[in-house]
Amino acid sequence: MDALLGKGLTRLIRETFNADKKLAVTSDHWHVVHARWSGAPGTPSFDCSIVSEHADSTSAVQAARELKLALGPGMASRARETRDQVIVRRPSAESLKSAGRLEKRKK
């Protein structure tokens, strides 16, 4: 699922600390983050990891859709608050390694 290696680009996923001194992951490329449910009911908690990197937003969105489809059957029986999330991030965007549920932005 790595769209970069075939285009001569290298992976650049790294862990860092954000301004609040919390552990985060980032990449210099467009990337897909899988936020896995890890909390107890009533305490939204997700462990985030970068699952793929991409040269452009179009390929990142396509990979995210494929991952979401693959996760779908396992998520159907869970409450909405406990379902894993799939997020497309811009180059250099930081995602906390452990975070609460990300809510969709209203357009």
Image (spheres, rainbow, N blue to C red):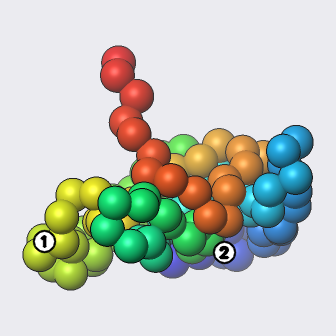
Q: Which residue is mark 2?
A: 6
Which sits in the foreground, 95 or 52?
Answer: 95
Residue appearing at x 79%, y 62% in the figure: 23
User: Between disc 1 and disc 2, whose residue precedes?
Assistant: 2
Q: Amino acid at mark 1?
A: Ala
Q: Residues within 10 Å of mark 2 (few under 14, many from 20)?
A: few
**Residue farthest front in this picture:** 42
Cα–Cα span, label 1 and label 2: 34 Å
Q: Position of residue 96 (x, y in %)?
A: 68, 57
Q: Is residue 17 above or below residue 4?
A: above
Quarter of the rendering containing residue 106: top left
- Side (left or right) of 24 relative to 65: right
Q: Position of residue 70 (x, y in %)?
A: 27, 77
Which sits in the foreground, 69 or 74?
Answer: 74
Quarter of the rendering containing residue 27: bottom right
Q: Is residue 21 visible?
A: yes
